[in-house]
Amino acid sequence: MAASPKDPIEVFYWSTPNGRKITVLLEELAVPYAVTFIDINSREQWTPEFEAISAHHQIPAIRDPDGPGGEPIAIFESGAIMLYLARKFGKLYPTDDERQCVAVDQWLMWQVGNFGPFLGQAHHFNVSAPEEFPYAIERYHGIAKRLYSVLDQQLTGQDYVAGDYSIADIAIYCWAARHPRHRIDLVDFPAVKRWFDAVGARPAVARGMAVIKPGRVDVMLPTPTWLKT
């Protein structure tokens, strides 16, 4: 039986792909939550108060007042949070089918260990680096194309990455949503584009992706003059 919280889950959040994994998931679960914005641009993640929640000083993190045994629990690392929430509320994770569990786990770990970190580097050298680093730009562009090719192959002939719609799709989608910053055109990856459009059309996904600190505008950064298309 799915659990229900005594009080809203507190989400320590900034509107990054990893942060949005958690708001999208909570919207899909229809679980009440409260957002505490941690402005990483202002280095708010380095406060002692936040360190008590997230030992690695990174968002996202959550504090569930109704954790295991009815006691509060704080969790950091987006993958761990997603697994915890999906298991707790009994949705978007196939707990009754071991093969499906393995499939979801491996694609979630693929996102956490490959899709996210390497695309984060592509994003950095494409739009955030203070100067042009041609080797890094081309290295991570090549890796980005390979990652999207892997995803395209997995999605060819099936609707979602691991059978039914799951936390793996949410995790990957939140990073794929920044594909222009990775110098990726989804037209080149038709199975990814079909999946991306379908996931993005889900109302809960749209709500979770839209969570942003009041007054902040999440816009595409200007393209550096050195960046080739």
Image (cartoon, helix red, strand yellow):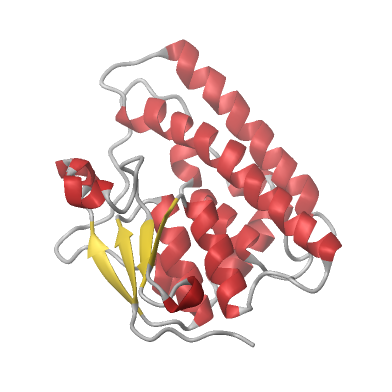
Residue 71 placement (x, y as % from top left): 40, 73
Seen from the viewer's position, the closer of residues 166 and 214 is 166
* Residue 21 in view, yes or no: yes
Residue 181 placement (x, y as % from top left): 43, 40
Picture mark count: 0
Query: Toward which corner of the image does residue 6 lie, by quadrant?
Result: bottom left
Residue 102 placement (x, y as % from top left): 78, 55
Seen from the viewer's position, the closer of residues 204 and 89 is 89
Seen from the viewer's position, the closer of residues 30 and 216 is 30
Query: Toward which corner of the image does residue 155 lie, by quadrant?
Result: bottom right
Q: Relative to 224, is 218 above or below?
A: below
Residue at (39% x, 13% y) in the render: 133
205 vs 165, left or right, is left
Query: Toward which corner of the image does residue 41 lie, by quadrant?
Result: top left
Residue at (29% x, 17% y) in the render: 131
Residue at (52% x, 77% y) in the render: 28
